[in-house]
Image (spheres, rainbow, N blue to C red):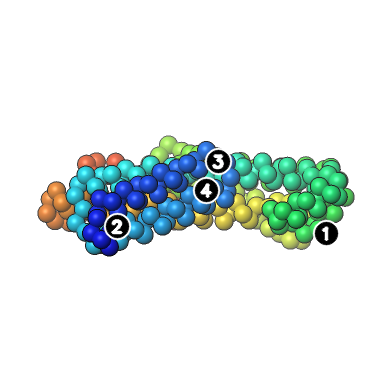
Amino acid sequence: FADAGHTGEAIRSILAAHRLAHLLNSEPCLISVLLQQSLYSIADAQIERLLNQFALNDAQLVALHQSIASFNVPAQYANAIIGNRCQGIAEEEAFRNGSSTEIQLIHESGVNSLEKDLVQQIKNRSATDWDADMSVYLEFHNSAIKLFKSGYPQLPASHGKYSENVKTLARMSELQELFSDKSNSIYIYSRSMTPGTSRTKEKCHQWSLQQQLAGTAMAIERYRLANRTLPQSLNQLVPQFLSALPVDPYNEGK
């Protein structure tokens, strides 16, 4: 559409891609959120292309900005980790108490990264070790869910939950250090199953950054149209063009 000069249709195709991604909002599944993020990234590249090639009017910029802002990135990742946590609990139960046929089905489905010898260790260990391992596994996941539900990593340092989130992040680092120690044979399951959650945190940071940059780009262009000049500071965009200053997800709260 853009190549043919049909700017309006090009914008509508981007909005349609966003609506398609929103169809996955209620699925507590990591693969669904990653698919949403991929759709968003594809559309994001085309938004940048449109901004560079065409002089969009204010109504078009507002439509794109509202659609960009319609994604609650932290909430989607909280949802994904809830599903991931449930899957981990169910699989661990199967490894401990399931039949060899059930365990074989999990391996054949390719959804679990545990090696067969580790599964055997899980089956044979004491209930005390199992409790300790699963307590750490659940605390780590619950902490990540709590973080994302609060709006992390998009919370400014001025937010009421910011200091609480700093403590939660510190505790997650402690837990990660605990189960990452390969000389410790207790946290077999936590060590094997939590790296995915850590990678999820990184993916959320990436999407949050894309969203903040795209929204700010829309606001800058709207300011330029209204004032015939670029803003000297992002503070000039608030509150008319941005509801709040963007937060850098890689630089806690700033």
Distance in Å between CA atoms under marks 1 and 4? 31 Å
Residue that carries the numbered disc 3 in the rendered image: 27
Q: Which amino acid does label 1 sit on?
A: Asp
* Whole-percent x, y for residue 202 in the image: 51, 56
Mark closer to the chain start, 1 or 4: 4
Q: Which amino acid does label 2 sit on?
A: Phe
Q: Is mark 2 on a helix, strand or loop?
A: loop
Foreground: disc 1 or disc 2? 2
Q: What element carries label 3?
A: loop
* Whole-percent x, y for residue 249 in the image: 43, 52
Indicate the quadrant where residue 177 lies.
bottom right
Residue that carries the numbered disc 2 in the rendered image: 1
Q: Is residue 94 above or below residue 183?
A: above
Q: Is mark 4 on a helix, strand or loop?
A: helix
Mark 1 burial class by Cα count in 10 Å: few <14, some 14-19, many 20+: few
Horizontal side, residue 129 vs residue 251: left or right:
right
Mark closer to the chain start, 3 or 2: 2
Distance in Å between CA atoms under marks 2 and 4? 28 Å
Foreground: disc 3 or disc 2? 2
Residue 237 in view, yes or no: no
Q: What element carries label 1?
A: helix
* Whole-percent x, y for residue 224 in the image: 17, 53
Mark 3 burial class by Cα count in 10 Å: few <14, some 14-19, many 20+: some
Mark closer to the chain start, 2 or 4: 2
Of the pair 2 and 185, the residue shown nearer to us: 2
Q: Which mark is residue 117?
A: 1
Q: What residue type is labelled 3?
A: Glu
Q: Residue 33 carries which label?
A: 4
Q: Which residue lies furthest to the front in this view?
A: 4
Mark 2 burial class by Cα count in 10 Å: few <14, some 14-19, many 20+: few
Horizontal side, residue 178 vs residue 72: left or right:
right
